[in-house]
Amino acid sequence: MTSKQSVLFINFAEEPFISQIYTHYPDQQLHRASAGKKRLPPALKQLHQMLGKGLQATAGLWPPLEHGYGFLDQAKAILANESQEFAQLIRERYLTLLAQMRENLASLGPLAEAFEHFCHITDNFSAGLFRCYDIVGLPRTNNDLEHCFGVARVHERRATGRRGAIPGVVVQGSVRVMAAVTSKEQIFSVDELRPRDYQRWRELRRQLCQREEARRQQ
């Protein structure tokens, strides 16, 4: 049994956990051990044995998890960039860590396939992953962008009743998505909706017409 697994057994025998057992199972007689005796109540002893069997049955899964979380902790520390390094240095450190992951796939057991896929995807997008460290205000994730697309999808679904993307969104997405997202944030007046730069407005309409024509010819 490893030291981490031993800690689990010790923690389950501590007083706070015993109190929780009494709280959740008030009808059961969980007889406490007499003062001075170093033994668990019968119910906790049974739980202790069940946990022991569970840890023994899953003993082979713990080392890969430990290695995997070790890699993830290193990746988290690199991306946190507490020393405020430039993007190029962060990229080099991160790609070095990916190389170490690939070299140690055998130690990851059933997690090897997931880590290999993670390394492959990271390599594909590595060119644009680290620009946020050089450009002030550039988000490190695309969560906000995904939220914007989700808002647009909800609007389209309510308006059309269709779950999938309709051709109009594909062709006119540059204006329809923007309209769906901004209209949720504020209500525009007639004056605000009136084009101020007619040349840009005509150019945008021309581009949309070209996309519609290309769509019809497909």
Image (cartoon, rainbow, N blue to C red):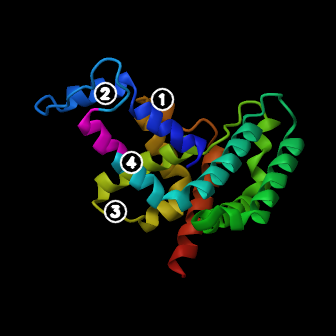
Q: In front of the other: label 1 or label 2?
A: 2
* Label drawn at residue 51: 4
- First of labels 4, 2 by sequence position: 2
Q: Nearer the viewer, residue 150 or 98?
A: 98
| Residue kind at label 3, given as amino acid type | Arg
Q: Which residues are magenta?
A: 41-48
Q: Is residue 45 magenta?
A: yes
Q: Which residue is mark 1?
A: 191
Q: Quadrant of the C terminus?
A: bottom right
Snapshot quadrant of residue 28: top left
Left or right: residue 23 versus residue 122 is left
* Disc 4 and disc 1 in contact, CB within 8 angstroms: no
Above or below, comparing residue 3 to residue 15 in the picture:
below
Q: In what element is the residue under mark 4?
A: helix
* Label drawn at residue 163: 3
Q: CA distance from mark 4 to mark 1?
A: 69 Å
Question: Residue 103, position in %: x, y?
Answer: 79, 64
Left or right: residue 163 versus residue 134 is left
Q: Is residue 115 magenta?
A: no
- First of labels 4, 1 by sequence position: 4
- First of labels 3, 2 by sequence position: 2
Snapshot quadrant of residue 25: top left
